[in-house]
Image (tube, rainbow, N blue to C red):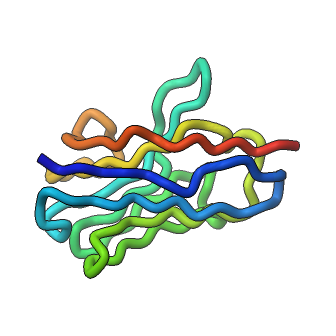
Amino acid sequence: QVQLVESGGGLVQSGGSLRLSCATSGRTFSDYHTGWFRQAPGKEREIVAAISADASTILITDSVKGRFKISRDNAKTTVYLQMNSLKPEDTAVYYCAAGTTQAMGVAAEYTYWGQGTQVTVSS
């Protein structure tokens, strides 16, 4: 079992910033790669960013590249998503996930999921 708890979501004006945190427990944090996914109303869940267990590989989806940054702090067993220059189209529920397979960008390959945190960007 791996437990993940997201925090940091909220309402922000277009152009603003938020930092999401994903606190983990139950397993050795360094054994898992972690990812951030989001799901907007009426849309499929999509990859936002992912980072490998040793932080040697980082994946950022094109729609947020240059605006979002993923990082992890193994000492705190926490993964972060820094979101800058937010746009209304970034509005979604954001989920943190952990897995051990090679396909970091594929939601179906992740074993453990948090409950999600709502991010709403007003125009």
Q: Residue at x 36, y 72 (%)?
A: 72
Q: Please give the count of numbered marks on the rendered protein.
A: 0
Q: Position of residue 52 (x, y in %)?
A: 27, 65
User: Where 123 falls versus 71 (above or below)?
Assistant: above
Q: Nearer the viewer, residue 85 or 58?
A: 85
User: Where 16 falls versus 90 (above or below)?
Assistant: below
Q: Quadrant of residue 8?
A: bottom right
Q: Position of residue 21 (x, y in %)?
A: 46, 61
As drawn, which residue projects farthest toward the bottom?
Answer: 75
| In this rendering, position of residue 123 left or right of residue 95 | right
Q: Quadrant of residue 122?
A: top right
| In this rendering, position of residue 47 left or right of residue 13 | left
Q: Residue at x 66, y 49 (%)?
A: 10
Q: Nearer the viewer, residue 116 or 32?
A: 116
Q: Position of residue 117 (x, y in %)?
A: 52, 43
Q: Position of residue 103 (x, y in %)?
A: 25, 48
As drawn, which residue projects farthest toward the right?
Answer: 123
**Which quadrant is home to the C terminus?**
top right
As drawn, which residue projects farthest toward the top?
Answer: 42
Q: Residue at x 39, y 38 (%)?
A: 115
Q: Residue at x 49, y 54 (%)?
A: 7
